[in-house]
Amino acid sequence: QVHVVESGGGLVQSGGSLSLTCVASGTILSIDGMNWYRQAPGKQRVLVARIVSSGRVDYDDSVKDRFTISRDNARDAVYLLMNSLKPEDTAVYYCNVEGWSSDTRPPHRFDTWGQGTQVTVSS
């Protein structure tokens, strides 16, 4: 099995910064995409940033030039540095990891979510 754990959320004032960390563990053979989603109260969960194994990154327009996603392949970790935070960034942030697991033969695809971490930006 593959497990994903996020950390680093909290309360910050508008204009401030926060850094989120997500670490995957378990029977991981390889990781393809590592993604950060967020879900605000009463709204759907949306993709915020994505980084694939080649290093290519994609951002939602609402966070471009403010958020930076990066990954550490040796640690099976992905990070989200959030600068110039706004009240509308308030949400539960979820890490999602996609790849191949070695706990079956042949290996199977996994798509695992973390439990989420709250980010609150006060005005």
Image: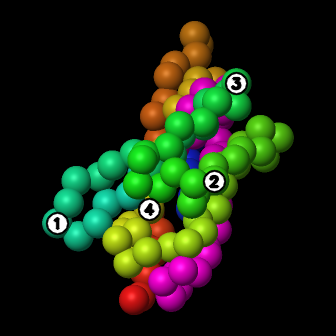
Color theme of the render: rainbow
Q: Nearer the viewer, mark 4 or mark 2?
A: 2
Q: Is residue 34 magenta?
A: yes
Quarter residue 17 falls in: bottom right
Crowding at label 1, few (<14), some or many (≥20) Cα neighbours within 10 Å?
Answer: few
Q: Is residue 93 visible?
A: yes
Q: Nearer the viewer, mark 3 or mark 4?
A: 3
In terms of secondary structure, where does tag 3 sit? loop
Residue at (41% x, 54% y) in the render:
62
Query: Mark 1 or mark 3, which is nearer the start of the sequence?
Result: 1
* Badge 4 vs badge 2, beta-carbon distance below 8 Å: no
**Disc 2 marks which amino acid?**
Thr
Residue at (64% x, 62% y) in the render:
81
Q: Position of residue 115 (x, y in %)?
A: 44, 61
Crowding at label 2, few (<14), some or many (≥20) Cα neighbours within 10 Å?
Answer: some
In this picture, which residue range is highlighted in magenta?
Answer: 7-36
Q: Which residue is mark 3?
A: 54
Query: Mark 2 or mark 3, which is nearer the start of the sequence?
Result: 3
Q: Position of residue 99 (x, y in %)?
A: 57, 27
**Disc 4 marks which amino acid?**
Tyr
Residue at the right extreme, as displayed: 74
Q: Is residue 66 magenta?
A: no
Whole-angstrom CA distance, mark 3 to mark 1, is: 34 Å
